[in-house]
Every structure is written in structure tokens, then in C-alpha cells.
Image (tube, rainbow, N blue to C red):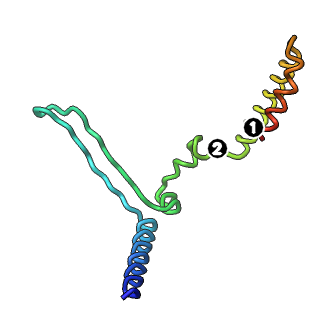
Amino acid sequence: MPNDSIQVSHARASGLVDVLDRVLDKGLVIAGDIKISIAEVELLTIRIRLMVCSIDKAEQIGLDWWRHDRHLSMGNDELAIENDQLKERIRRLERQLEAAPGTAQRAPKLRAKRLDRR
């Protein structure tokens, strides 16, 4: 009896893997419209379009918006440049802090705290 439940569980898992593989390979599109009206006056329309597929399939059909979205695919060069700019800004601010009257004793403590965070 325990072997039967293992076989059923394995069959379900492999069936799910097959379905997922087919969906990612071929793609799945779900589309629908929701309209809210009162007395035949349309108040709200919501258009829903959902597409599930692999990245390879999306590229085959011409979808590649994630490559051009700066929030999703910021290049490593851009990140490195931004990081260097921020480090230089921190250095300038530390120099200004050290040069300001009355803060010379505090500056080394602030720098030590910053180093501890790394």
C-alpha cells in the first residue's frame, strides 16, 4: 500500500513537470475584459492580458522588454560607474567634514564606523 502512494505522487510530479515544460515551450496566453456598468453607463473597464512562456520563446516572438527596462537590466558597467561616483562623493564629504572647524576629532570615528559596516 505505501508503494502505491509513492507511485501516485511520482506520477503527479512528473505530470506537473510535463505540463510546465509544455507551457514554457509553447506559451500560454490568458486574456479577459472586466467591465463595470450601472444603467448601461460604463464606469470601469479592465483589460487583462497574461502570457506565460520561457524567455527563449518570448524572444522568438519578439518580446524582450526586460532587456530595455533600466530597473531590470542595468548593465554592469553602469553599476560600476555609479558605484565609483558614490565612493568619490563619500570621500569628498569626509574631506569636507575633516576640514570643518570643530569636527576634526569626530571624523576618524565616523570613518571607522563606515568601515565597520562593510
The residue positioned 78% from the left and 41% from the top of the image is: 118
Quarter where residue 89 is shown: top right
Mark 2 or mark 1, which is nearer to you? 1
For label 2, count other residues whose C-alpha is less than 10 Å away and answer few (under 14), some (14-19) or many (20+): few
Q: How many marks?
A: 2
* Residue 3 appears left or right of 40: right
Of callouts 2 and 1, which one flags the residue occurring earlier in the amino acid sequence?
2
**Neighbours of disc 1 within 10 Å: few (<14), some (14-19), many (20+):** few
Q: Position of residue 20 (x, y in %)?
A: 43, 68
User: Which residue is denoted by mark 1 in the rendering?
Assistant: 83
Q: Nearer the viewer, residue 11 or 73?
A: 11
Q: Measuring 81% from the left and 27% from the top, which residue is drawn there?
A: 110
Res 74 label = 2
Q: Residue furthest top?
A: 101
Query: Residue sitting at 67 percent across and 45 percent down?
Result: 75
Residue 50 vertical position relative to residue 110 in the rendered view, above or below: below
From mark 2 to mark 1, how far is it between C-alphas? 13 Å
In this rendering, the answer to whether 52 lies above or below 70 is below
Above or below, 115 against 15 in this view is above
Question: In the image, residue 10 lies at what x, y percent?
Answer: 43, 80
Name which residue type carries label 2. Met
Instruction: List x then y, in percent, for residue 90.
Output: 79, 28
Which of the 4 quarters of the picture holds residue 28?
bottom left
Q: Secondary structure at mark 2?
A: loop
| Between 48 and 56, the one nearer to me in the picture | 48
Residue 66 placement, left or right of 77: left
